[in-house]
Structures are given as structure tokens and as C-alpha cells.
Image (spheres, rainbow, N blue to C red):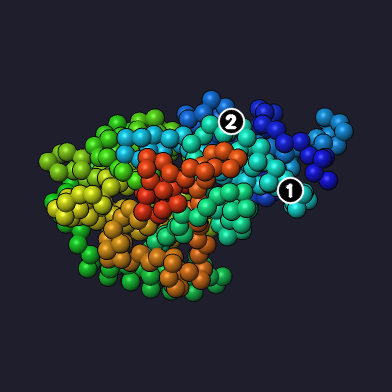
Amino acid sequence: MTDSYEIRRYEPTDRDGFLALFEEVLGGEMGAEWFAWKYEQNPYVDHVPIVVAERDSGSNSDSELVGARAFFPLTVAAGNDRYDAFQPCDSMVHPDHQRQGIFTRMTERALEWYDDVDLFFNFPNHRSLPGNLELGWEIVSTQETYYRVQNPAIWLSQPWPVESVARALARGYTSVRDRLADSTGGFDVVRHDHVPPTVLSMLAGSETVSQFHVVRDETFYEWRFENPHWSYRTVVATHAETPVAAVVYGRRERTSGSTTVRIVDVLPLADTERSLDSNSRRTAALSRLLDDILRTNEDADVVVAPGGVIPRSVLNARGFHSDSRVPLRWISSSSTHVVRPAGETPSDWTRSGRQLTDESNWRLAFCEVDST
């Protein structure tokens, strides 16, 4: 019965219950440091933006956290206009309490409490997409992701000799692509073993992006890449010692699994409203940076890049393949970009005169996604 559940705001004493529920439902021991970074230290809110469901057994000592609907607040801009945006994330209901309407009730309560937020956007997988659509979200697009597979055995359950052969074949293929790719362009590369907020915010501030995108200022860069489960580095392309482009990438090594490198931010972000010469310069700079990242991470099992912000020609030249095509479509799990204005029954689906559900009105890398 749904009456046996209390839907309420998160309280500090809920942290351990939230982390235990995460491990039970979503898998993985995330830890207090991760929770502090993601929720307690988020600079865009003054509280922990989580709605929880608690099973009321008639005694406070016996209450149990059985559901959570969390949010990842960010500032989104379109041109010079800024908006408060919440990204639903880490949504979970304990298996013993599913099909009780808990997910729906948590979401409806969150929409009531956060009716002053400008918009919600997120990237559900095929399992959680129907629930979002039923509650008023609409589809913007299927997110295209590019993979450079340097060790195909990560998707195979095979003994060591097979893995060794698969890696050797993949390395031969990517080596040929790298030799054929153009990585010149007259740019020097400056490497940082961290994320430099001043350099990146300066590059981001030098352009006006008319599409919806996350605001990349010093506040964002000082917080966003402190996720303890990833190690972040930055490469900056310079010309005459002046920064002209940058890429932030994260690396995650699992003791019993694959080593993944994800390209999480790309600057400059815009390219659609520039001259051909400017676009060519941006393409050359990003090609140079990608070359440096791949050389540094030859031992990684897979390198992942977002579609839409790095020219497809640059990715294809380096042996990246889209998950929208076979064979990756068969073995990868794509996500869908969905959006919803705030309010119980929103009627205005535009911001800055742009339709929220139009894919061409968005400019997204991976840093907008909460899990990286």
C-alpha cells in the first residue's frame, strides 16, 4: 500500500541509507567522499537536492529508506540568458518495494518543491525512459557516443590468450589510423594533471554559444571535476603561447574490469556560427589534442567521446566508431536526452526563443552528465 510510505526531503541522517540503497539497486560502493562532492558541495544549491521514500513501519527506529529521487543542479545558458536546471539522477527504488508507485510519487513531490527551477533535463536509459515520459518529459534526441576500442576483449568472456590477440589486433588497427590522421596544425600542447579553472573559464568566456549548454565558469570547473572515482587531466592547444582550444578527459581504472578514458569537455564549444577558417582552426586544434590524449592513454581499454562537439571527421580518422551503428549498436547501451520545463503542467516549452525539444538547440559534451 502506498500509504505506508512517507515521501519527504533528504535529511543528513539519510546519507548512509542512501549509499546502501545505491549499492543494492544501482551497484557499486560510492562512498561518503563521492556523496559529499556530488550533493553536499554542489555550488548551485544550498541544500542536498534529494527526495526520499521511507517505509513507515509505525516506529521511527524501524523506518527504512526504500527509494530516492536525486538531482544534479547546474546552470544552463543560451546566448546571454541563464537558467537554473536540475538533472534527475541516481533514481532508485528497492526491489522489494517496486510497483508501488513510489517513483511516481517522489517525482511528483520533487516537481512541487522545485517549481521555481527553469527546466529539468537528463539522460535516462531504455529502462527508465518510459517513467520519465509518463511524468511529462519529452525526447530531444538519442545521444550519440563514439568509442575507440583498444581492447575488444572487454566485451568478451574469453581466456587470456584470446584477450591478448584481440588487444594486439585492435592496437594494429588504431596504429594505422593514427599514422594516417593529420595531427599537425602548428599548435603546441600544454598538459595539466588537473583541471585549470582559470584557463578553461577564459576559453569558455571568449565565445558566445547560442544553443543550450552548461555555463563553464570558474565555479563550475572548481567543483565539477572533483569526482573521486575519476582522475581528470587537461590538454591545451596553444598558438604563440595563447590558449586556443582545450580538452578535459577523465580516466577510471577498475581493479577487476576495464580502464576507460572519457573525453568530458571540449573548448571551444561552438562551431556552427563561425567562418570556415575558424572552423578549420578549431578542427586542427582538436585533432592535435586528441592525438596527444591517445598517445598518453595507449594502455586504456576504451576511449569514449561525445558526439556533436568534436567533428566527426576527427573521430573517424582516429578509429572511433558511433554507437548508433553496428556492431557497437549491438553491444552498447545508448541514452536518450529528455527535457521538461518546471511546473505541474508546463505550457511554455521555449527558453530564449528556442524550443527545448529541438536537438539543434543543444550543445552538450559529457560534463553535463552526472555520472562522469
Residue beneath the point at 38% across and 49% down: 362
Q: Is residue 265 visible?
A: no
Q: Is mark 2 on a helix, strand or loop?
A: loop
Residue 59 image point, x, y percent: 86, 31
Relative side of 72 to 248, left or right: right
At 20% from the left edge and 49% from the top edge, which residue is drawn?
274
The residue at the far front in this view is 347
Is 83 rendered above or below residue 173? Answer: above
The image quarter containing residue 115 is top right
Q: Circle 2 sits on which residue?
A: 48
Per the image, the residue denoted by label 1 is: 101
Q: Where residue 3 appears, x then y in whole percent? A: 82, 40
Q: Position of residue 63 (x, y in %)?
A: 80, 35
Q: How many marks?
A: 2
Q: In this view, does 40 lie above or below 102?
A: above
Q: Kindly indicate the quadrant of the structure image that contains residue 125.
A: bottom right
Closer to the eye: label 2 or 1? 1
Mark toward the start of the polypeptide (2 vs 1) = 2
Residue drawn at point x = 41 percent, y = 38 percent: 76
Q: In this view, does 191 lie to the left or right of 61?
A: left
Seen at 14% across and 53% down, the residue is 277
Reply above or below: 165 against 15: below
Nearer to us in this view, 112 or 68: 112
Q: How crowded is the residue under tag 2: few (<14 C-alpha within 10 Å), some, or many (20+)?
A: many
Cα distance, mark 2 to mark 1? 23 Å
Would residue 369 be visible to someone looking at this image? yes
Amino acid type of the residue tagged 1 in the rendering: Gly
Q: Helix, strand or loop at disc 1?
A: loop
State the residue in front, 36 or 162: 36
Q: As shown in the figure, which amino acid type bears the numbered disc 2? A: Val
Q: Where is residue 213 in the image (x, y as percent from the top left)?
A: 38, 43
Badge 1 density bin: few <14, some 14–19, many ≥20, Cα 10 Å: few
